């Protein structure tokens, strides 16, 4: 959890804006169905780690490569939409929490079946 309310507000705002930019501005036909699950800003607000979830896990790395190659577009669009002194650098990462949750469900189901 972030210690400052401003950082939390910026995380939410950046998550919404980046998701909107992916849907409306990113014109790469190779991009699949992407969900922006979370944004974590560093305490100095210089770096934003954007966590994404992809519907087709086989295309996850391709989507990450496309998004990381498009960080200039994202920073440009964010600078037009949000008034902050410094636009953070953007780094896209895969969100593994859904996969982790499925794995836990599978393990719990196996335990239940053994009983």
Image (cartoon, rainbow, N blue to C red):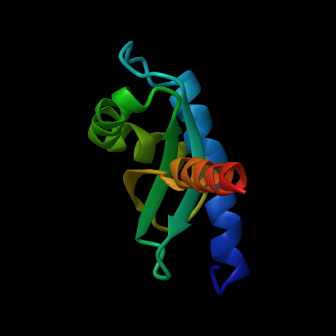
Residue at the farthest front position: 115
User: Residue placed at 71% from the left, 66% from the top?
Assistant: 9
- When the figure is inspected, residue 86 is found, relative to residue 18, above or below; the finding is below
- When the figure is inspected, residue 36 is found, relative to residue 115, above or below; the finding is above
User: Residue placed at 65% from the left, 87% from the top?
Assistant: 3
**Quadrant placement of the N terminus:** bottom right
Q: Residue 53 versus residue 25: which sits nearer the camera?
A: 53
Q: Position of residue 59 (x, y in %)?
A: 36, 27
Q: Tell me, yes or no, if residue 55 can be seen here.
A: yes
Q: Residue 15 versus residue 60: which sits nearer the camera?
A: 60
On screen, residue 87 versus residue 12, left or right, reads: left
Q: Residue 108 versus residue 114: which sits nearer the camera?
A: 114
Disc count in the image? 0
Residue at the farthest bottom position: 3
Residue at the farthest top position: 29
**Quadrant placement of the C terminus:** bottom right
- When the figure is inspected, residue 44 is found, relative to residue 25, above or below; the finding is below
Q: Tell me, yes or no, if residue 82 can be seen here.
A: no
- When the figure is inspected, residue 53 is found, relative to residue 91, above or below; the finding is above
Q: Residue 106 versus residue 62: which sits nearer the camera?
A: 106
| Quadrant in the picture for residue 58 | top left
Q: Position of residue 46 (x, y in %)?
A: 41, 71
Q: Position of residue 74 (x, y in %)?
A: 43, 42
User: Residue placed at 61% from the left, 58% from the top?
Assistant: 83
On screen, residue 59 versus residue 81, left or right, reads: left
């Amino acid at each position: 959890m972030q210690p400052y309310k401003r950082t939390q507000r910026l995380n939410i705002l950046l998550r919404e804006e980046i998701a909107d930019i992916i849907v409306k501005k990113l014109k790469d036909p190779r991009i699949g169905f992407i969900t922006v699950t979370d944004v974590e800003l560093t305490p100095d607000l210089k770096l934003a780690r954007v966590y994404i979830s992809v519907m087709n896990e086989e295309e996850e790395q391709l989507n990450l490569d496309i998004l990381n190659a498009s960080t200039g577009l994202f920073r440009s669009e964010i600078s037009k939409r949000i008034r902050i002194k410094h636009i953070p650098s953007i780094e896209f990462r895969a969100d593994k929490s859904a996969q982790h949750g499925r794995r836990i469900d599978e393990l719990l189901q196996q335990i239940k079946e053994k009983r």
